[in-house]
Image (cartoon, helix red, strand yellow):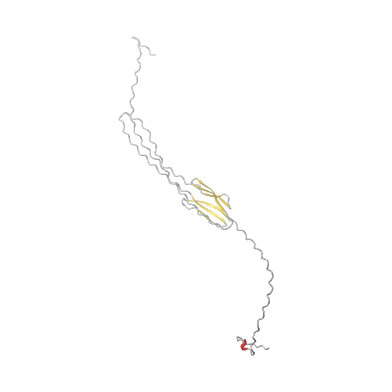
Amino acid sequence: MNIYSCNSGQDPCCCCPVPCPVPGPTGPTGPTGPAGGPTGPTGATGATGATGAAETITVRQTTTAEPGTPAQVSDVSGGPNHILDFVIPRGATGSTGAAGPTGSTGSTGATGVTGPAGTTGSTGATGATGGTGATGATGPAGPAGTTGATGNAETVNVRYTTTAEPGYAAQVNDVTGGPDHVLDFIIPRGATGADGVAGPTGPTGATGPTGATGSAGATGATEPCIIGKRLKPS
């Protein structure tokens, strides 16, 4: 049988010099091939990642601020090695104390010469008691510290808060260090107000009346005598 080629792009059945053959019937489907080989072994589990590095907290400095200034805690470095600066206001100075009590009454004058009784002078009014000084205001609570990056957890506990004398510098002491910090606070109290001014001295009392004249004394004894001769005194 001769085979003829056809022009490009045309139906082969339209250009062949002989009738195109009719396709034969489709043959039966062949048998299914054998299954593939066994499943390969499971890969090994990857290694566990390394544990995160521990973080530290260090108190660098504690500054005493003016009364009324907000308390502050600043993390000046960030994680993992935190460095904290504390700013704690000192207590406000107390107000001036109350006025002192009224002075004592002057001593009674000496008894005057005989004469008419003097008039009694009026007693001066007692000075008013000064009001009690106001208590200094309590400083505001410090802001919450910033949350550290993920790592080994650390704790911060306040153990003691001690009130110091006025003028003493405020302190925050980390007595244990990390990871379980125990802090002791020392905060000075406000200075005591100055004593109030003493009240004025009360007026001198009036002169008292002259005392009564005393009674006459008893007559002395008469000296005995004998007629014509005076006895010698014994």
Count of marks overlaid on the render:
0
- Residue occupying the far bottom of the picture: 17
Vertically, is 118 above or below 49? Answer: above
Q: Decide which of 232, 224 is in the foreground and name it.
A: 224
Vertically, is 103 above or below 216? Answer: below
Q: Decide which of 23, 41 is in the foreground and name it.
A: 23
- Residue occupying the far left of the picture: 116
In-image side of 172 versus 231 (left or right): right
Position of residue 217 measured from the top left corner of the image (x, y, whole percent): 34, 21
In-image side of 33 versus 153 (left or right): right
Q: Quadrant of the N terminus?
A: bottom right
Vertically, is 166 above or below 3? Answer: above
Vertically, is 33 above or below 161? Answer: below
Position of residue 108 measured from the top left corner of the image (x, y, whole percent): 37, 32
Q: Quadrant of the C terminus?
A: top left
Position of residue 134 measured from the top left corner of the image (x, y, whole percent): 43, 46
- Residue occupying the far top of the picture: 228
Position of residue 93 measured from the top left corner of the image (x, y, whole percent): 45, 47
